[in-house]
Image (cartoon, coloured by chain):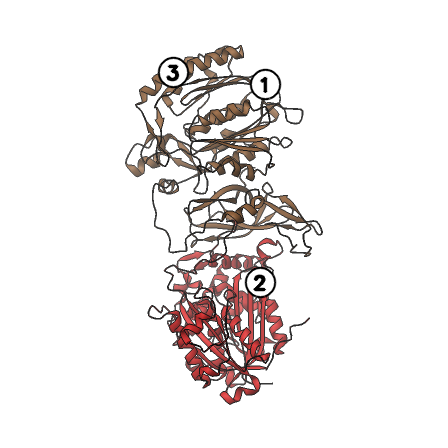
Amino acid sequence: MNGIVAYGTYLPYFRLDRKAIGDALGGGGGKGSRTVASYDEDTTSMGVEAARATLRGAPKLAPAAVYFATADPAYLDKTNATAIHAALALDDSAMAFDMVGSIRSGAGAMRAAIDAGRPTLAVISDIRTGLPGGGDEREGGDAAVAFLLADGDANTPVLAEHVASASASAEFLERWRIPGDAASRQWEERFGEHAYVPLADAAITSALKQAGATAGELAALIVAGPHGRANKRAQAAVGAKPEATADDLTGTVGNTGAAHAGLLLADALDRAQAGDLIAVVSLADGCDVTIWRATAALPSHRQKVPVAAQAASGGKVAYATFLTWRGLLKREPPRRPDPQAPAAPPSFRAEAWKFGFTGSRCQACGTRALPPARVCMKCHAVDKMTPERMADVPATIATYTVDRLAYSLSPPVVVGVLDFEGGGRFTCELTDVDPKAVKIGDRVELTFRRPMTAHGVHNYFWKARPMRGA
Amino acid sequence: MASNGIRDRVAIVGMGCTSFGEHWDQSVSDLLVESSQAALNSANVPIDMVDAFWLGTLFSGQSGLTLSRPLKLNYKPVSRLENYCATGSEAFRNACYAVASGAYDVAMAIGVEKLKDSGISGLPSIGAPEDGTRAGLTAPATFSLLAPAYCKKFGVDEGAFKEAMTRIAWKNHKNGALNPRAQFRKEVAKDVIACSPQVAGALGIFDCSGVSDGSAAAVIVRAEDAYKYTDKPLFVKALSFIAGPATGPIDPDYDYTTFPEVVASATDAYAQAGIKDARAELAMAEVHDCFTPTELVLMEDLGFAQRGTGWKEVLNGTFDLEGELAVNPDGGLKSFGHPIGASGLRMLFEAWLQLRGEAGKRQIASVARGRKLALTHNLGGAPGECVSFVSVVGSERS
């Protein structure tokens, strides 16, 4: 049986109240909130977080491939999926490919993983915004989601069986962006509606026919895409039961672009019962439909923190800070040395440490070293180390400081001296944190981030964030 | 294996020190000419009589040419070295060893740094290309880690600790106000210090040393030759330099209330000098007050105060100019700023003045009462990962 054996979602910590946009710009903010990727996040780092949440659900199955999809890739030319592959410490033999640049690439990564014939991790991540005051800024949202597709076995059972897939492709100019532009452009809204509705009808009809099901049998019907009105028209046209349509999260999270169909599927899996049929309709430059059937294994293997709980948590970000983070408000830099970009050869040599947070443990005396060392700090044994991945080991704040001088897009910088459970100490930046609330003894967990970009090089590394509610 | 030391084998017979500050009108070369000339004049030695030179600078030049070019040295050996913030002291230490070894009769140690040409605040960044995984803390942030750790370990109220920090800054500025060479020559009120803008952790602007340009130099000869040059030489009693394993930031056993490197270098230096009770025997100490909590912790690491009591001793005035043991009588890094390569020799210059009774308004009374030893101390790096230097000099050969 081919299907989803694990899934996980990541919503960044910060929320922008839409009202704050209206307050700053004099009207037009709207209701609710949207998620906001922090200054130290990008689609790659968020993808890592969603993938980590997913792989926690399938500890016995290593993916043989990673497909990464986003409309907002951190790099062009260079593959972004390799950073995710490294951060997950996957075997070198596992493939890592990008499918980037368009919203539809999310549906493509999912379909490719379904068809892969090997355990494949589809990671879909997006950061959405537009020019200040516009609808894309207001209605967009940032999120990442990942699904592990495999045949399933007793250790790693299928949670949602793949039942049917159908697509309808078409070329038309509805939403587009020239590489490098800060915002998308969109044709007149009614035109998109006209183009999408028949495509949706064709793909949905075909998928239901393959599944041997009627619209009335769908327990959940998900329609996602960049065109809100087309989504609503397509949803209504299917003829599913009213209760099959759940909250589309646009009020609390926003429309998360390439990630949105996956995010809503994860939300449905958080609640679905064995036997439920779930149809996912993605409307982006055509229509891609997938129908899933929840299995008996699902209720005991859901992701740890459901989408609804993730959506309900988080902290506020001010509108000016949001604009600064997205590069739309250029702020005066401090009179400090320019940040130094990481160099390629040292980063290459340190891949397991920098991306995988793999330290070492002395075989002679058991002392852990972060970063990995050749000589033990306690017993001075030389080259008696074994690698030890520490990315999922919780830590406690031994001491900390608030650095108001260090350069950051989000000052002040909070730095913690972390003592890890089972040994090992490392000093690193804290993130998603209120400087006034940090205390010695607080528990923290690691999160993969992009601390800075200098001279066109993204620096990826780990930070620590407060362990919340878990 | 032992640290044998070179007690009383070499002597300082001349010193020079520029004023420290924002020397917009003086180049690195100008500063080097000025301090070297002052040291040579003080020793009554023509430059041709100096056999070898050790130049300390971290950012302001590379190679011996940084010194030989401005001084137009006639084909003499010049070593340029750095050892973080102990750079100036390291130049001195190596020059002393060269004379003690018999390799040279007369050596000069000279330090210089020109920080104000960079246009940024703090120190310029240096370093080899790296993988981007080190937490980018600023220097004040790393030293600010001392305050909460100390308070927690010894059960000290954070307000009382901050008061001790403030008093250190107040004391050093008070001393600096009496020093014509200092960058800042004004007393600063305690409430101004305490309420200064926050920099990192509990540190305000006035808890941090300044940034300045400066240079200082010393002429070193064999101890038996010392009185040929001056009737008031200073004899080198001890030189200790320690580089720690830098494990503090990765070792859960390190608690951020001490600099083990300082303890090790002080222990070594006291053994070399034959000092049993530093607080009772020293006339003064110049210590590395890069940030006020650093000086507080140093009082304990150097053995001037019992563990957990340094803050009280500070508040009681033990280390004031008129106190039991004057610490940073010249005003310290707080009043001078910290031109890296020059600072260690600037500290030594104060020992030179004080032990010879030439410190004017800052003259320490205990020297007249017979105390003959002075200590200088440098620290480079951060808590848990630093280098430390301690010297002891004295006005009498034992």
The answer to which of marks 3 and 1 sits earlier in the sequence is: 3
Which label belongs to residue A197?
3
Q: Characterize the local packing of mark 3: few (<14), some (14-19) or many (20 or more) Cα atoms within 10 angstroms.
A: many
Q: Residue B100's x, y, as percent?
A: 58, 79
What is the distance, in whole Å, between disc 3 and disc 2 at their CAs? 71 Å
Tag 2: residue type? Answer: Thr
Residue occupying the far right of the picture: A364
Which chain has been coloured brown in this picture? Answer: A
What is the distance, in whole Å, between disc 3 and disc 1 at their CAs? 31 Å
Give the chain letter at badge 3: A
Q: Image height check: is B311 above or below A341?
A: below
Callout 3 and callout 2 share a chain: no
Answer whether labels 3 and 2 touch (C-beta < 8 Å): no
Which chain has been coloured red in this picture? Answer: B
Tag 3: residue type? Answer: Val
Which image quadrant is residue B59 in?
bottom left
Which image quarter is the C terminus of chain A in?
top right
